[in-house]
Image: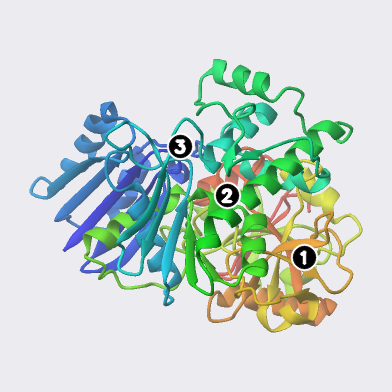
Amino acid sequence: MNILTLHHGHNGSITISKDNELIVHTELERFSKIRYGTDFTLNLIERINELNIYFDLIVLSIWHPADIKSILFSLINKNKNCKIIVEDQFQTKHHIYHAYCAAYNIDKEFDYIVVLDGCGKFNKNLEEEKVSIYDNNFNEVYKEYYTGDVSLGWAYQIVNLALYQQLFPCGKTMALSCYGSYDDNIKILQDNKFNKKYFKKNLGRHKEDFLTATEWIPGLSDSKDNKKALDFVHTFQKGCEEYVFNLLKRFENKKILFTGGVAQNVLINTRLNNETSNTVYLDPMSADHGISLGMNVFYTNNKLKRRHTYYLGFQPKYDLLDELFNKHTIKESNEEEVARLLTQDPVAIFQGGSEQGQRGLGNRSLLMNAEHKDCIEKINKIKKREWYRPFACSILHEDLEEWFETDNKKEPYYMMFVYKAKKKVNNIVSVENTCRLQSVKKENNKNYYNLINEFKKQTKLPYVLNTSLNLPGSTLVEDLFDLCYVFENSDLKYIWLPDIRKIIIKHGC
């Protein structure tokens, strides 16, 4: 059976399988170019049609029912005889799809799956689901609904609104929290519920919601000099960690799959892993961009064969390379030359199917020698990141324990934990001397491994600064058109294309 599943909401995504083989999984925003976007666009339909797959089943999990017609028309046009199922995602299986996605991605024996996010489905009293726990047969064993309070996910979004007038920059808020101090006078939790003084109800996307958030939590900003704000955000993060700890006290010495948007918080994840008796596994697609994958697993009756990779996007097409980059030099190259350039300047790497999520993992990444004295200045001419947001790194897996305290944490392929540095490293650690990192094995990403290994031969450093390949506020680069836009609109000088063993050098360099 050939199946297309579509999650049509924030962090929307599609997944395509053919006879239980996973063909592609990708986020809608990579094609709409709107971060966290929901739009199902013509260029995405074109890429789907190029696969020449006729679907037996199309399942749509819809955010707003009014959007159904445009989506259905574009899909039915080619697949007139397929079965179509339309679900309202908040009346059906949102959390169970998170659970199926986690079990598929992690592929470990487990006792329970814990789902924490903004909200799941409504119950008969129109209360929203905020916590779901399943056993290893996907039976629901515990659930919590809002009863006049908010979920952890919504609490985080309220703080985001008060800080940035945006719902989803949770990573910024988490990074900012490292710069404050704990304030006992700020009571984030009351009986393990978020204090109604600050978190009265869910807020949405309307202008009045931004204003409401600033009324509930006045004076928040990300200014270095705003100590009161920094202390609030730090205390809030610690309250979120305490909330999850209290929830998971019911488990001892269990194997837990942790998923839902909350599992994107690497500070919560790290504490769970270090300070509880449980073994905690993290779903790298824990945010809603994994929902369509969970749907596909569900509708294949859990028979979808594992790809054991996170690089699941469409394969790039290079036929327009010369035309798009005709002002610049395109030439044959190798890891030795690219590593040499990397010692002095940022280099983009573009290859294979794109990784999913907000983190560049070596297929759509911007790299730099982390120990270069002007590293941050050079990277920020392109990225323009806020002062408090540390950069991540990619390190050869065999060198991980020499450079970082791994404790009992799982192998960090997906940047889901933070690690304390054992040695002095620059530009990739937070103010707390921790780093969100990716260990790289040759079997997981051969081209990326070979580049870092060559860099190590030249510098004796087995790691590079790695940040996602995109401009500020933009989505991760998906195709050559995106890549060209970044190249033409930034100070980026070099792009390495290992698929075709070529490098692009900006005109005049």
The image quarter containing residue 402 is bottom right
What is the distance, in whole Å, between disc 1 and disc 2 at their CAs? 18 Å
Specify the amino acid type for callout 3.
Answer: Gly
Amino acid type, label 1: Leu
Q: Is residue 401 above or below residue 85?
A: below
* Depth check, front residue: 494 or 197: 197
Element under disc 3: loop
Label 1 residue SS = helix
Which of labels 1 and 3 is toward the front? 3
Residue linked to disc 2: 483
The residues tagged by marks 1 and 3 sit, at their Cα atoms, a distance apart of: 33 Å
Which residue is disc 1 drawn over? 342
In the image, what residue occupies the spot 36% across and 45% down?
44
> Tell me, what colour scheme is on the image?
rainbow
Disc with the residue nearer the chain's start (3 vs 2): 3
Residue on which disc 3 sits = 37
Q: Earlier in the sequence, mark 1 or mark 3?
A: 3
Please say whether residue 386 is visible from this viewpoint: yes
> In the image shown, does 150 or 8 lie closer to the viewer?
150
Neighbours of disc 2 within 10 Å: few (<14), some (14-19), many (20+)? many
Residue 473, percent from left and from top: 62, 37
